[in-house]
Image (cartoon, rainbow, N blue to C red):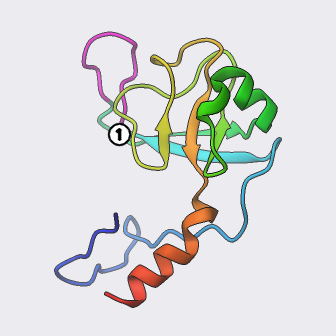
Amino acid sequence: MLIKLKEPAIFKQYVQPIPLATSCSFAGEQCLVSGWGKQITTGVDYADKLQCLDLPVLSRAQCESAYGWQITNNMFCAGFMEGGKTHGDSGVVSWGYGCAQRGYPGVYAEVCRYTDWVQSTIANN
């Protein structure tokens, strides 16, 4: 889903476009993830400031060892086998087991697979 704004955004220091992916991720590459998800595994302690973290992209074998057949070509894993994303994070971060659970890194959408769709949708709307 893309959101169409009622009025054009006014770009300034904290309002900027995000460039579309020009290539797909590869194992060992660092990626920046951000979100306002929970900061603890229990309760409702959501971040009041955007949290950012550099994470390593994991190999397909590592991803499949954690999640098996559930991983498609439209997904990749990033993070640490010690644990991944947490509840409340959504968007490009797709899913994972539990909240930063050991052995289950975060699963993310492989945005490069959707670039043509995004550009086509923007052009036609």
Report the number of numbered marks.
Answer: 1
Q: Main secondary structure of the magenta part?
A: loop
Quadrant (top left/top right/bottom left/bottom right) for the C terminus: bottom left
Image coords of residue 48 (percent x, y) = 29, 35
Of 123 and 55, the residue lying toward us:
123
User: Which SS class for mark 1?
Assistant: loop
Left or right: residue 6 compared with residue 116: left
Left or right: residue 76 compared with residue 30: left
Amino acid type, residue under disc 1 in the picture: Lys
16 above or below 125?
A: above
Left or right: residue 103 compared with residue 62: left
Q: Which residue corresponds to the image point at 72% horizontal and 29% vertical from the top-left?
A: 64
Residue 41 occupies quadrant: top left
Q: Which residue corresponds to the image point at 46% horizontal and 83% vertical from the top-left?
A: 120
Q: Where does the magenta region start and end? A: 36-46
83 above or below 108?
A: above
101 above or below 79?
A: above
Residue 72 occupies quadrant: top right
Of 113 and 48, the residue lying toward us:
113
23 above or below 98?
A: below
Image coords of residue 45 (percent x, y) = 29, 20
Residue located beneath label 1 in the image: 49
Of 83 and 74, the residue lying toward us:
74
Image coords of residue 47 (percent x, y) = 33, 31
Residue 86 occupies quadrant: top left
Q: Which residue corresponds to the image point at 83% horizontal and 41% vertical from the top-left?
A: 28
Quadrant (top left/top right/bottom left/bottom right) for the N terminus: bottom left
Image coords of residue 105 (percent x, y) = 62, 26
Label 1: few (<14), some or many (≥20) within 10 Å?
Answer: few
Left or right: residue 68 compared with residue 92: right
Q: Which residue corresponds to the image point at 41% horizontal and 89% vertical from the top-left?
A: 123
